[in-house]
Image (tube, rainbow, N blue to C red):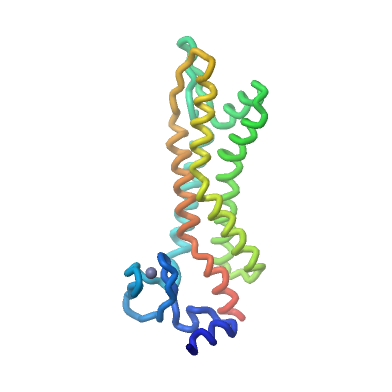
Amino acid sequence: MSATATVGAGGTAAAAGLLSCHSCGLLSRARPERARCPRCAAALHLRKPDSLARTTALLLASCILYVPANALPIMTLHKLGAGTPNTILSGVEHLIEAGLWSLAAIVFFASIAVPVLKILGIGYLAWSVRRGSRWRPRDRTRLYRVVESIGRWSMIDVFVISILVALVELGELATIETGPAATAFCGVVVLTMFAAASFDPRLVWDAMENQG
Ligand SMILES: [Zn+2]
């Protein structure tokens, strides 16, 4: 097949008039009309539609939600009638005070560090594609793979908080109430997952094609 030879020679499948199915991976010929995959009938796109705009919008929304997720109390601990609201950070401080270093590290890493790293990673990728960067495309593709694979485990962040709640409850005569930050935090997790999913890593390589 001649198209295969063109792709092998260093061009992209898109330049050879071929596109792959997002769902089943089947490679088929690009047609001007809105095409469907001949094998699984999913809608075919040369690149994810409006990838950069969607990624940027979802990232901005997650940045906005990140503020209440950390500033507002994630849970309120009622002990003998008195309630103490805790943010994620003050929860980490309490864990350190209680000598639970490893748990404090897990909560800090999963709930504060990982969302920031995800937002920075996807933000950098979107920014570099927007300005047509040709700097280290292979490393940037790797960065995308890392961010996306972290995304699969994002719900662990929420899970860690429920473990924290359960731990605080153990041994004490206390009740726990989740605060408004929990909703915002779930929003950050879901939005960063969608932002990573809507980014099309092939855009990183399109800049190499257009200018080279
Ligand atoms: Zn398909």
Up the image or down, 147 lies above or below 158; here it is below
Q: Quadrant of residue 47?
A: bottom left
The percent coordinates of residue 17 (x first, y second) are: 45, 82
- Identified at 61% across, 61% down, the residue is 142
Toward the bottom, the furthest residue is 2
Q: Quadrant of ligand 1?
A: bottom left
The front one of 52 and 12 is 12
The percent coordinates of residue 154 (x first, y second) are: 51, 45
Toward the top, the furthest residue is 80
Q: Quadrant of residue 97?
A: top right
The percent coordinates of residue 177 (x first, y second) are: 44, 24
- Identified at 57% across, 60% down, the residue is 125
The front one of 34 and 116 is 34
Image quadrant holding the C terminus, namely: bottom right
- Identified at 54% across, 74% down, the residue is 206
The front one of 128 and 46 is 46
The percent coordinates of residue 134 (x first, y second) are: 63, 71
- Identified at 59% across, 82% down, the residue is 10
